[in-house]
Amino acid sequence: MNFGIRSVAVKIGRRRLVVLFVVLAVGIFTYRVLRSGVPDDNPATPDSPAGRYVGELLQSGVSSSFPAEGLPSPDNRWKFLDEREISTVSGSGYCRAKILDVRSGQERALFILWDADPGSGCSLGVRWSSDSKALHLAGKTRGFGYWSLNSEPFDFDFIYMIDIDKMFRLSQAD
């Protein structure tokens, strides 16, 4: 009789594990989709947290050439990563812009962007602030997110604030 109770308990335990796995998978997918959309639409005004970095980051251009293992911040605490993926939509591809906390190994997705010119790769340049607390991201895309694919390319220009995990717009994003 004990064997029967144990068997039922194992079956219930397995079902709970399956439900937990499904909930976790849906949660991760939802998080990735929500984080992949158009970056926050906060203007980088002089009074915003990004305001103090506007002058520094616009002094010189962004670099669109960085090592495959990531572009390290000046203090080597962070790395900017650009992960390329190919889509089945018109031979296009998209890139996932993210940062890696070198100490903890945690990655933070910043946004997803489509190729400005299908098949040519993503047009994205980055530059770290001297204190490693802000990241300038500029380029051209046909849309942000997995589902948004505009037909006409447009420019974008953002400052991402590491400590508060927030994006600020330097120019209009569609």
Image: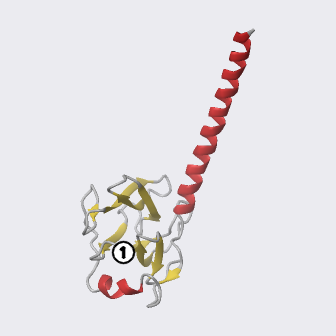
Residue 89 place in picture, x, y as percent: 50, 56
- The residue sitting at 44% across, 60% down in the picture is 108
Which image quadrant is residue 22 in? top right
User: Of 121 and 128, which appears nearest the observer?
Assistant: 128
Tell me the element at label 1. Answer: strand
Which image quadrant is residue 155 in? bottom left
Residue 40 place in picture, x, y as percent: 53, 74
Residue 83 place in picture, x, y as percent: 37, 56
Q: Is residue 90 visible?
A: yes
Residue type pointed to by label 1: Ala
Q: Please say if 21 is above or below 77.
A: above
Which residue is most to the front? 2
Which residue is most to the bottom? 46
User: Of 110 and 2, which appears nearest the observer?
Assistant: 2
Q: Please say if 49 is above or below 1.
A: below
- Few, some or many C-alpha atoms within 10 Å of disc 1 (few <14, some 14-19, many ≥20)? many
- The residue sitting at 36% across, 58% down in the picture is 100
Say left or right for 141 vs 76.
right
Residue occupied by mark 1: 134
- The residue sitting at 34% across, 60% down in the picture is 81
